[in-house]
Image (cartoon, helix red, strand yellow):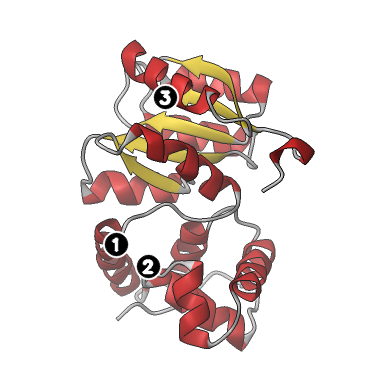
Amino acid sequence: MRTSEREPIRVLIVDDHELIRRSLALALAAEPDIEVVGEASDGQEAVELADRLMPDVALMDVRMPRQDGIEATKGIKASVPSTRIIMLTVSDEEEDLFEAIKAGATGYLLKDVQINDVPAAVRGVHEGQSLINPAMAAKLINEFQTMSRKESERPPQLPVPRLTEREMEVLRLVAKGMNNREIAKQLFISENTVKNHVRNILDKLQLHSRMEAVVYAVRERMLEIT
C-alpha cells in the first residue's frame, strides 16, 4: 500500500478512561497512514467533536457517563454518516452488540485485543469491512433469527429497493457472518467482485454498513434467517 499517495485515515478516540485513550492514540500515531484528530471522554463530547472534525473512523467506548457509546453512535451517524464506528467494550453481551449494529456501528472490538491489532482494525472498517469476530457473528445471527420471526407478523414497508439475485446471495452470506474472502470462495468469484456487490447493496439501500443492510433486509422481509 502506497500510503504517501493517500490522505491519512482520520480517527476520533472516545473513552472515559484517559489511560485507554492515550494507549490507543500512541498505537495509532505510530502509523504513517493514520492520524488521530481528536479525543473525547464521553458520548456528548464525541458527537460535538465528530460534527466539527468529520473523522473517517471513531473508536467508541460503549459505557460512558453523560451519554453512552450507542447513543453517541446514533448522533454521529445522523450528523456525519460517512464516519465508520468501531465499538470498544469489555464484554460481548448480545444486547449491546445488536444495539450497536442497529445504531450504525461497523465493528465491535473487545478491549482485551492486542493494541498492535487496532491499526489493522481501523484500516479494515475504513475500507468497508465489518469488524465482527466469529463468536459475535453467531450471536448476531441468533438476534436476526429472533427479529425475523417478530417482523414476519408485520406488513412490509413499501417501496423496498430491489436487489439482483447475486446481490441477495451476497447479502445472505453476509448475514451468516462471512467476510469477503469467504463469500468469494463460496460463490467462486473474486474478492473485488464481492466488494462491488456489497457497495451496490449499500448504495441501493442507502445504508453505510453491511450489518445495517442485513438488519434492513430482515426488517423488510427481503431476507429470512433460518
Give the Cα distance between marks 1 and 3: 24 Å
Per the image, the residue denoted by label 3 is 24
Question: In front: 158, or 223?
Answer: 223
Give the Cα distance between marks 3 and 2: 27 Å
Q: Which mark is residue 103?
A: none
N-terminal-most mark, 2 or 1: 1
Q: Residues within 10 Å of mark 1 (few under 14, many from 20)?
A: few
N-terminal-most mark, 3 or 2: 3
Amino acid at dot 1: Pro
User: Looking at the picture, does residue 10 appear above or below residue 159?
Assistant: above
Q: Position of residue 113 (x, y in %)?
A: 29, 39
Residue at (41, 70) in percent of width and height: 178
Mark 1 or mark 3, which is nearer to you? Answer: 3
Query: Looking at the image, do the residues carrying marks 2 and 1 touch, with CB atoms under 8 Å apart?
Result: yes
Residue 149: quarter of image: bottom left
Q: Is residue 105 visible?
A: yes
Viewed as shown, does residue 50 lie left or right of 16?
right
Q: Quadrant of the C terminus?
A: bottom left
Indicate the secondary structure of the residue bearing disc 3. Answer: helix
Indicate the secondary structure of the residue bearing disc 2. Answer: loop
Per the image, the residue denoted by label 1 is 134
Per the image, the residue denoted by label 2 is 177
